Image (cartoon, grey):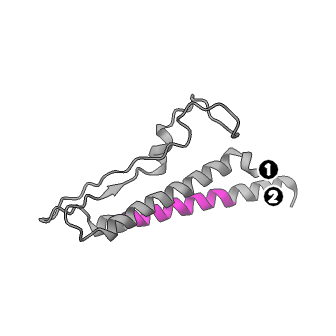
Amino acid sequence: MYQSLALFQTAHDMARHAGARQAVTARNVAHADTPGYQAQQLAPFAETYAKNDASIMRTTRAGHVSNGRQGQDAVASRGMAEPSPNGNAVSIEEEMMNAVNISREHNRALTVYRHTMTVLRSSLGR
C-alpha cells in the first residue's frame, strides 16, 4: 500500500541518492594518494530533483510505457580542488565536508519517511 505514495518514493530516492554520493566521496578519500586521480562528486538531491522535468510522463507500475528517461542516475562530475604536484585533485578537508552534508541529506530522508509514517498512522487512527 505505502509504495504507491509519492512521498515514500521521494524519501526512498533521497536516501538512495545520499548513499550514491557517500560512495563517490568514499572513493575519493580512498584515492587521496593516487597520482593523477581526479576527485568526483554527485550533485545534491535538490539539484538533481530540480533538473527533472515535472511535465514528463512517469511510470508508476512496471507495465506502463516509459519515455526512456525513467531511473536516470546523476552523473559524477569533477571536483573543484587544486591538483597537487603529482596530479591528485582530492582535498581531504573538502571530502570530509561533503560527507557531513551527505549525512544530513540522508538524515533528512529518514525524517521525511518517519513523519510520513506518523501522518499515515494518525490518519488510520493508530
Outermost residue to the front: 63
Mark 1 — residue?
1
Q: Position of residue 43 (x, y in %)?
A: 41, 50
Task: Please tell me how many numbered marks the rendered image carries.
Answer: 2
* Residue at the (14%, 65%) spot, across then down: 86
- How far, Cα to Cα, is label 2 from label 1? 13 Å
Q: Quadrant of residue 58?
A: top right
* Residue at the (83%, 52%) spot, across then down: 123
* Residue at the (69%, 58%) spot, across then down: 115
Amino acid type of the residue tagged 2 in the rendering? Arg
Quarter the C terminus occupies: bottom right
* Residue at the (52%, 32%) spot, across then down: 53
Outermost residue to the left: 85
**Mark 2–mark 1 CB contact (< 8 Å):** no
Amino acid type of the residue tagged 1 in the rendering? Met
Foreground tag (2 vs 1): 1
Residue 64 or residue 55, whichever sits in front: 64
Q: Which residues are magenta?
A: 98-114
Q: Position of residue 26 (x, y in %)?
A: 39, 67
Mark 2 or mark 1, earlier in chain = 1
Image position of 33 with respect to 38: above or below: below
Mark 2 — residue?
121
